[in-house]
Amino acid sequence: MNPNYRRSDGSLCYIFNIDFTVKNRGGKSTSIYIYALKGDNQTKILNCLGDPLLVCFPFVPETNFTLTSRAQLMITHYDLENSVNWDPDKDGLTFDLLFVDEYGEIMGGIEDLDY
């Protein structure tokens, strides 16, 4: 993860480069989620609309064979700065990376990704 990545439009972002492998998911919706959380790693940071601040990469593997790939996901500094329940001076910041199946069930992930 790079906390100071600048997109082509000039926006400063947290960028996550994720190398992953999935198997036996042919034709099944699969998603990678990154959630922004307060430093307690339990309280989801809410965007300006009051929804959890997250980014999602959905995909559907074509076969059940093993798929190894890479995804890039970004959360902008702007979205964090305009959240309704996060104070960078008091709350801390961490992220959860989750792999989710077509039913919304968590298949695996990494929690408490500090930067």
Image (cartoon, helix red, strand yellow):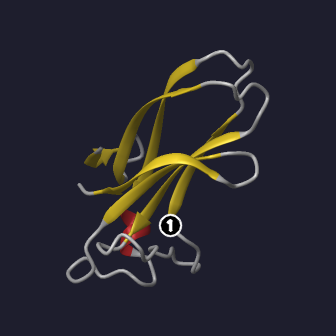
**Residue 108 vertical position relative to residue 51 in the rendered view, above or below:** above
Count of numbered circles in the view: 1
Position of 61 with respect to 106 (left or right) is: right
Q: Position of residue 26 (x, y in %)?
A: 75, 25
**Residue 4 vertical position relative to residue 63 in the rendered view, above or below:** below
> Disc 1 on helix, strand or loop?
loop
Residue sitting nearer the eye, 18 or 7:
18
Q: Position of residue 110 (x, y in %)?
A: 40, 49
The residue positioned 42% from the left and 35% from the top of the image is 18
Query: Which quadrant of the figure contains the N terminus?
Result: top left
Kind of residue indicated by mark 1? Leu
Q: Position of residue 8 (x, y in %)?
A: 40, 40
Residue hosting label 1: 53
Q: Position of residue 54 (x, y in %)?
A: 52, 60
Instruction: Decide: few, some or many residues near mark 1? Use Cα within 10 Å; few <14, some 14-19, many ≥20.
Output: some
Position of 82 with respect to 87 (left or right) is: right
Image quadrant of residue 32? top right
The residue positioned 52% from the left and 78% from the top of the image is 48
The residue positioned 74% from the left and 39% from the top of the image is 29
The residue positioned 31% from the left and 45% from the top of the image is 6
Query: Which quadrant of the figure contains the C terminus?
Result: bottom left
Residue sitting nearer the eye, 24 or 35:
24
Residue farthest to the right? 27
